[in-house]
Image: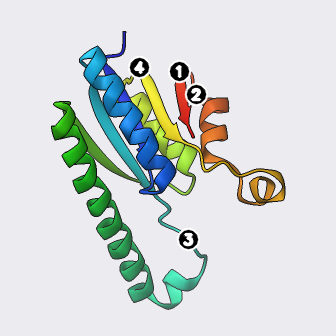
Amino acid sequence: MFKHILLATDGSPSAGHAAQKAFALARIHGAQVTAAYVVDPYPYLGIGEANPMGFQAYMSAAQDASTKVFIHLADLAAAASVPLQVRLVENIQAARGILQVADDAAVDLIVIGSHGRSGVEKLVLGSVAGKVVAQSTRPVLVVR
């Protein structure tokens, strides 16, 4: 049924639960997994112009964080005997970056973790998982 699964990850505990589910599904279906880690290249306006070193330090830290996540996912993929590709995506909106990777890779399923926010916290912070579900043309599995 599923041949290519996109795992959206940010290295959080909820993304870890989603990774376990994605690799289990991939093993069952004989699918490959592409893991996408989205970085906002413009986390603050104006600072990059005034201090280009700040921007470079931010992007370097983001790449280091994604590398640690990808190493962990490679271990999980190897344990499940599942082929894994990784993608570091720069996009100001995480949901858009995830959906772009889904389109580029022509995946059959998107697996994403939910932080389980509610009330004012959800209203203020938004929900990447909710945006992916609302905007995706593909099936999305949200893991809590």
- Position of 57 with respect to 110 (left or right) is left
User: Label 4 is placed on what type of residue?
Assistant: Asp
Q: Residue at x 30, y 24 (%)?
A: 26
Q: Earlier in the sequence, mark 3 or mark 1?
A: 3
Which percent across, then down, holds residue 79?
A: 18, 38
Q: Earlier in the sequence, mark 4 or mark 2?
A: 4
Q: Count neighbours of disc 2 (C-alpha within 10 A) and say few if under 14, some if 14 to 19, many if 20 or more.
A: some
Mark 3, secondary structure of its residue = loop
Q: Earlier in the sequence, mark 2 or mark 3?
A: 3
Label ID, residue 136: 2
Q: Which residue is mark 4?
A: 108
Q: Are marks 4 and 1 in contact (CB under 8 Å)?
A: yes
Q: Which residue is mark 1?
A: 139
In three-dimensional space, the C-alpha distance between marks 3 and 1, rounded to whole angstroms, equals: 30 Å
In three-dimensional space, the C-alpha distance between marks 2 and 3, rounded to whole angstroms, equals: 24 Å
Q: Are marks 1 and 2 in contact (CB under 8 Å)?
A: yes
**Occupied quadrant, residue 106:** top left
Q: Nearer the viewer, mark 3 or mark 1?
A: 1
